[in-house]
Amino acid sequence: MTRGEFLKLLDSSLKKLPEEERLDIIQDFEEYFDAGMMEGKAEEEISASLGSPRQIAKELLASYHLGKVETTATAGNIMRAVWAVIGLGFFNLVIVLGPFIAVAGLVFAGWTTGAAFVLSPVLVLINTVIFPDTFVLFDLFLSLALAGIGIFIIIGMYFATKAIINGFIRYLNFNMRLVKGGLKDD
């Protein structure tokens, strides 16, 4: 593959990156080609030593999205990072997506439980309005106790969610280094 073909394929594979970031990467690879040609290497030899432009782009996209999620951990950034790491290899579909779905399910269940407990007094009052003959004072006091427990669950879920997000980001970084073969020095 010639220099032009390599850079064109790399550029088209990096379309999801901001233009400034993409141009910086292309410039770095142009400099790599220039340095290789000064050493007397052919363009095909240099491009073969670099590897597949598509795989390079996948790794760069994953690194970019992981860096972005480390600075701003929004749900959208986390999803983009997960999909970018999954894109590194088919094996990651099971290794990344499985734990992500399990963790997301646990977090969702915790927040839903807390919210349901907090809203339980409102549900008791709605039940009393609809069916006034079924009101029992015990139900009201039990729902108030559940609301208190729900507040503690929500507070706990706030801190647990932050810890889980940080842990999952570390897991994604570990997985990306593993796929790229960077664990040899660790």
Image (spheres, helix red, strand yellow):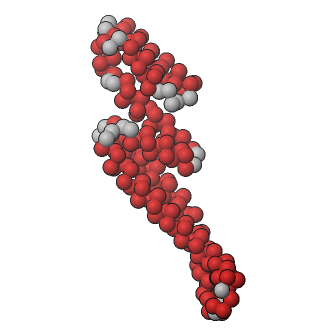
Residue at 45% from the left image edge and 55% from the top image edge:
167
- Does 179 sit above or below residue 121? above
Is residue 94 shown left or right of residue 119?
left
How many numbered marks have been drawn onto this rendered protein structure? 0
Name the quadrant of the N terminus: top left
* Image-quadrant location for residue 185: top left
Query: Where residue 65 sits in the image (x, y, percent)?
Result: 50, 39
Q: Quadrant of residue 112?
A: bottom right
Whether residue 32 is visible here, answered yes or no, is no
| Residue 48 falls in image quadrant | top left
Locate the C terminus by quadrant.
top left
Image height check: is 34 above or below 59? above
Which percent across, then down, holds residue 5? Answer: 38, 14
Q: Nearer the viewer, residue 71 or 85?
A: 85
* Percent coordinates x, y for residue 98 in the rendering: 36, 54
Is residue 98 visible from the viewing direction of this image? Answer: yes
Q: Is residue 63 above or below residue 161?
A: above
Q: Residue at x 46, y 21 (%)?
A: 11
Query: 59 or 35: which is nearer to us?
Result: 59
How far across and how far down the image is residue 178, in percent? Answer: 33, 42
Q: Which residue corresponds to the image point at 47% horizontal and 27% vertical from the top-left? A: 14
Left or right: where 74 falls relative to 58: right
